[in-house]
Amino acid sequence: MDKWLCYARFAKTRTVAQSLVEGGKVRINRETVKSSSRMVRADDVLTIRLSRDVKVVRVIGFADRRVSPPETATLYEAVTG
């Protein structure tokens, strides 16, 4: 979980991503996640509460490393209400 958040650029580092998860600021399919080891699967919907924003995205891909901003489009799509 924390790797995906970092690689998709929702968090600057894995430590920050882990803090988001352990702080209850991340949900997978409407369920609050408390463990950064939770698996993320394709088609999962993540709700990420950031300092000034809430992002709701559907996972569509994975990366082996942190990707450039344009490449993040291959990892998720925004979900609109």
Image: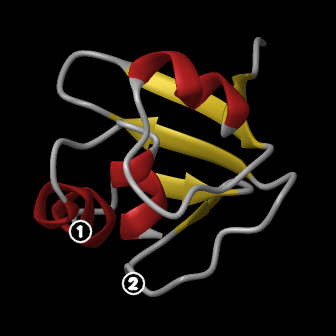
What is the quadrant of residue 41 in the picture? bottom right
Left or right position of 15 against 33: left
Say which residue label 1 marks. 18
The residue drawn where x is 50% and y is 26% is 55
Depth check: give the residue in front, 45 or 31: 45
In this rendering, would 76 be left or right of 70? Answer: right
Q: Which sits in the foreground, 59 or 69?
A: 69
Q: Residue at x 17, y 27 (%)?
A: 51
Dot 2 falls on a residue whose secondary structure is loop
The location of residue 30, given as percent across then percent down, is 68, 54
Position of 52 relative to 58 (above/below): above
Identified by mark 1, the residue type is: Gln
- The answer to which of marks 1 and 2 sits earlier in the sequence is 1
Residue occupying the point 46% across, 41% down: 8
Where 66 sits versus 73, above or below? Answer: below
Residue 4, image x and y in percent? 48, 59
Name the residue: 33% across, 51% down: 6
Badge 2 is on which residue? 35
Quarter holding the C terminus is top right
Number of labelled discs?
2
Q: Give the amino acid at mark 2.
A: Ser
Asked which secondary structure carries label 1, the reply is helix
Rendering quarter of residue 62:
bottom right
State if disc 2 and disc 1 touch (CB < 8 Å).
no
Q: Residues within 10 Å of mark 1 (few under 14, many from 20)?
A: many
Residue 67: % across, % down: 43, 39
Alpha carbons under labels 1 and 2: distance apart: 8 Å
Rendered image coloring scheme: secondary structure
